[in-house]
Amino acid sequence: MLPMIVRWMLRVGVGSVLLLALPLFPATVTVSSASQMAEKSDLLDINTATAEQLKALPGIGDAYSEKIIKGRPYQRKDELVQKKILPRATYEQIKYKIVAKQK
């Protein structure tokens, strides 16, 4: 005689069992969430970063870091281009490495 779970699986189909079991295994969601959180914590806040931290970004030197600091506060990071603080090409190099956090 087959165990009860095997009989149930044969009755509803293996595919249905797998769909029902997916919510029981959120490990992939947890791992991807953790990696996204780590990436977000690596972002440099342009509203609070020091000149040295800004200069560490690709394409940002003394002049651009000073312009970024003088233009604070920013509501969005794309304001660096809108306010003509950075050229679009330089912004495109750093846009995934920065954030403009609000207090």
Image: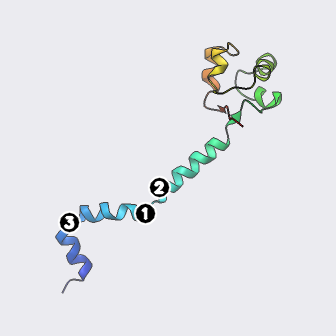
User: x, y percentage for residue 3?
Assistant: 24, 83
Quarter containing the N terminus = bottom left
Disc number for residue 28: 2
Mark 1 or mark 3: name the one nearer the start of the chain.
Answer: 3
Identified at 26% across, 78% down, the residue is 5
64 vs 9, left or right, is right
Q: Which residue is mark 1?
A: 25
Q: Residues within 10 Å of mark 1 (few under 14, many from 20)?
A: few
Task: Please name the amino acid that badge 3 sits on.
Answer: Gly
62 vs 32, left or right, is right
Distance in Å between CA atoms under marks 1 and 2? 8 Å
Q: Is residue 98 above or below residue 79?
A: below
Distance in Å between CA atoms under marks 1 and 3? 19 Å
Choose top left, top right, bottom left or bottom right for residue 57. Answer: top right
Mark 2 or mark 3: name the one nearer the start of the chain.
Answer: 3
Determine whether label 1 and label 2 are within 8 Å by CB.
yes
Identified at 58% across, 52% down, the residue is 34
26 vs 72, left or right, is left
**Secondary structure under the numbered disc 1 in the rendered image:** loop
**Secondary structure under the numbered disc 3 in the rendered image:** loop
Choose top left, top right, bottom left or bottom right for residue 52. Answer: top right
**Secondary structure under the numbered disc 2 in the rendered image:** helix
